[in-house]
Amino acid sequence: MNAHMSPPFEGRFQGHFDPRGTAERLASEFASRAEANDRAGVVDSESIDALKSSGLTSLTVPRRLGGPDIALPVLVDVVSTIARADPATALILAMQLYHCRSVAYSKTWPAAVRDAVLRSILDDGAMINALRVEPELGSPSRGGVPATTAHRTANGWRLTGRKRYSTGSSQLTWAVVWAATQDGEPQRVGEFLVPLTARGVRIEHTWDHLGLRASDSHDVIFEDVALPANYAVDIRPSDAWSGRDEPLNAWLPILLAALYDGVARSAYDWLLAWVESRTPSGLGASLSNVPRIRQVVGEIAGYLETNALLLWRAKDQYQVDEARHAEPLKSTHTSHALNAPPLSFGLVKYTVTQNAIAAINRAVEVSGNHALSRRNPLERHFRDVLCSRIHHPQNDLILDGAGAAALADNATAF
């Protein structure tokens, strides 16, 4: 067990367990370290250990293995709470929860491998993320074959390549690596499970970005890493990857929307306190007495209220969609929101993150130089929220897909 592992979690989820309350309890502690870690550009390993020991990194381990298998609506609230305190740590947690569930419900992973990974998450505090982005390829969501390759051997595979933007890199136990086969057969692409303690794996400290500086998103390099045959957990022809696992496709945009909404809410909290406390000598009263200032505060409140409604509807619709997917012929589940229109989860991410950016922009405009001073957290929130535009699915892909869907629906109406 390494320094980042926590004691075994056996029995952790027996009896009452409150993920939301646990996140709220940890948040103030995380917030107290967020600024220093951002300045240093280092991951908050103390917070990651606290997430492990509290059980929050195991929330998507299935019940059959002793995990709680917490539903997405609760996870959205947990990620949002942690993000208000420390969005870099929240991003690591969001990736952990998303990919743990992806493993748990995969239909391709060998059962023994899948369960071993999930048990390590539950019992040892293991961390997992998928590593896909490459220097030449960019994001696989835009097509192309990865330069990372896996060659067959007599005992399994040998994997070689470099992955960029590997969030949580030094904290990870497992990586699900996107690679192309080079084994004499028709080329396939897909996922290879790699233990990051394996010989030939190393981390190169390349992460030096504007925002989420403590997310530990360095390059991970694989140099002829030996893998067992059954660690090729999901390899397919490249055109066989589209449209897989529709319910899970909703997770990432909703979790990311909640994360960046949390950043905007922290910025709003700071602005409210600053407006109340700021008393310019020429005014002789708090800025809260200035109509123009109150109007900006109201405008930001409107952005955040819209976000809250969208996230509430997204959580509700996800539950309905998941039930229908599980039992398409038997399901009688209906939305809790009366006559609510259907949502595009991609558009939820787009709208919520655009609102979060707009909200912080207005806070910056109204607070002036104070907003850009590194002594105030608004400067950090301003940088962090801009990272929302980079995460998959990116805005252009969301809008192109939404436009294509709208045009297709319109064509069928005639």
Image (cartoon, rainbow, N blue to C red):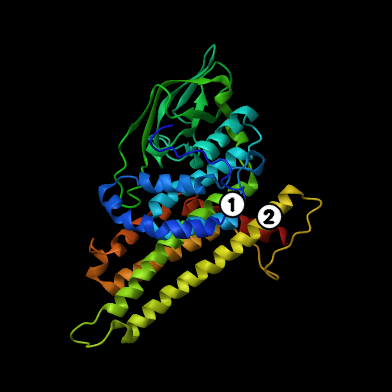
The residue wearing badge 1 is 250
Look at the image and tell me whether residue 400 can be seen: yes
For the point 57% across and 36% down, the residue is: 118
Q: Considering depth in this image, is 342 or 257 the residue closer to the camera?
A: 257
Residue 393, which numbered label?
Answer: none
Q: Tell me what residue is drawn at x 59 percent, y 54 percent.
A: 72
Front residue (pair 185, 360): 360
Q: Is mark 2 on a helix, strand or loop?
A: helix
Residue 184, image quadrant: top right
Identified by mark 1, the residue type is Ala
Give x and y (percent) for residue 193. Answer: 52, 29
Residue 113: give x, y in percent of width and height: 59, 28
Q: Do the residues labelled 2 and 1 touch (CB within 8 Å)?
A: yes
On the image, the x and y values in percent for residue 16 come to 60, 55
Q: Residue at x 22, y 88 (%)?
A: 284
Q: Name the residue under label 2.
A: 321
The residue type indicated by label 2 comes to Asp
Question: In the image, what residue occupies the spot 42% across and 55% down?
Answer: 388
SS of the residue at dot 1? loop
Is 352 drawn above or below residue 366 in the view shown? above
Q: Nearer the viewer, residue 292 or 30?
A: 30
Query: Outermost residue toward the right?
Result: 330
- Image spot of residue 202 (x, y percent): 36, 28
- For label 2, count other residues whose C-alpha is less than 10 Å away and answer few (under 14), some (14-19) or many (20+): some
First along the sequence among labels 2 and 1: 1
Residue 294 versus residue 62 in the image, above or below: below
Is residue 407 visible in this depiction of the protein?
Answer: no
